[in-house]
Image (tube, rainbow, N blue to C red):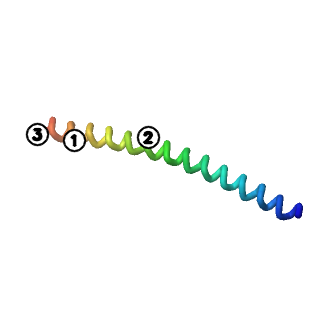
Amino acid sequence: LYYIYGAHNLLTTCHLSANILLEMNTKSFNLLLKEARLGSQKEIEQLLALD
């Protein structure tokens, strides 16, 4: 019984940290996307300025 309880706790902990990781990844991914968009906008503006 104790073994099953321990395994359940482990699973719950893993699940929680997976969710936290996922949330962090989503946030940093969104930041990366924003930076990429800003970067490409600047690059496009620079290219247009060259013409």
Residue 14 on image: x %, y %: 69, 55
Q: Residue 31 carries which label?
A: 2
Q: Which of 42 and 4 is in front in this view?
A: 4
Query: Which mark lies nearer to you, 3 or 1?
Result: 1
- How many residues crowd mark 3 within 10 Å: few (<14), some (14–19), many (20+)? few
The residue at the point 72 percent across, 52 percent down is: 13
Q: What element carries label 3?
A: loop
Left-right relation of 26 to 8: left
How many marks are shown on the rendered structure?
3
- How many residues crowd mark 1 within 10 Å: few (<14), some (14–19), many (20+)? few
Residue type at the position of mark 1? Ile
Residue 33 on image: x %, y %: 39, 45
Q: In this view, does 15 lie above or below 51?
A: below
Q: In which quarter of the image is the C terminus?
A: top left
- Res. 37 image quadrant: top left
Q: CA separation, marks 3 and 1? A: 11 Å
Residue type at the position of mark 2? Leu
The residue at the point 78 percent across, 55 percent down is: 9
Residue type at the position of mark 3? Asp
Does label 3 or label 1 sit earlier along the sequence?
1
